[in-house]
Image (spheres, rainbow, N blue to C red):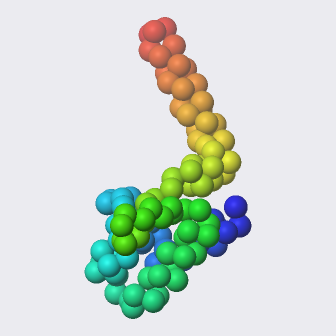
């Protein structure tokens, strides 16, 4: 999980993930066209994303395609965000029921 958070801490790596979310399965060349940095810099960022398991690589002939792996982000959501979201939804549901009961008594 530490590698995931470290990878997500960098804005450039988040930008690369956004590019893959918008158009999954891009080559290094395609990603470089959309970034304002050298090919080597993009390669290093992609390597860190791969080590964090945030992207997967599929070879298509001689071309290496990069795909977003949503599982680690889903695990972060479940562990750190989802449990807080449930309480908010429950509070809204309780409020809705209370308002409906008040309007029925009028």
In the rendered structure, the answer to whether residue 74 lies left or right of residue 61 reads right
The x, y position of residue 64, in whole percent, is 41, 70
Residue 4 position in % (x across, y down): 63, 65
* Quadrant in the rendering for residue 54: bottom right
Residue at 28% x, 80% y is 33
Give the farthest residue toward the top: 105
From the top left corner, tell me how far across and down residue 49 is, in percent. 55, 70
The quarter of the rendered structure image containing the C terminus is top left
**Residue 93 visible, this orientation:** yes
* Residue drawn at the location 68% of the way across and 48% of the way down: 79
Residue situated in front as seen by the camera: 44 or 5: 44
- The quarter of the picture where the N terminus appears is bottom right
Residue 31 placement (x, y as % from top left): 34, 75
Placement of 73 over or under 12, stated as above or below: above
Left or right, 73 with respect to 19, comes to: right
Check the image and report above or below for 31 versus 19.
Answer: below
Instruction: Determine whether 73 is above or below 47 in the image.
Output: above
Q: Nearer the viewer, residue 46 or 8?
A: 46
Tell me which residue sits at (37%, 64%) in the image.
Answer: 60
Instruction: From the viewer's side, name the closer residue of 77 and 44.
Output: 44
Q: In this view, does 39 lie to the left or right of 89?
A: left
**What's the residue at 49%, 8% (across, down)?**
105
């Amino acid at each position: 999980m530490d590698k995931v958070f470290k990878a997500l801490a960098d804005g450039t790596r988040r930008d690369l993930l956004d590019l893959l979310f918008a158009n999954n399965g891009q080559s290094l060349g395609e990603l470089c066209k959309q970034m304002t940095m050298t090919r080597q810099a993009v390669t290093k960022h992609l390597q860190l994303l791969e080590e964090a398991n945030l992207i997967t690589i599929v070879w298509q002939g001689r071309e290496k395609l990069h795909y977003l792996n949503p599982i680690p982000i889903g695990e972060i959501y479940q562990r750190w965000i989802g449990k807080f979201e449930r309480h908010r939804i429950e509070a809204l549901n309780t409020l809705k029921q209370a308002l409906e009961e008040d309007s029925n008594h009028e």
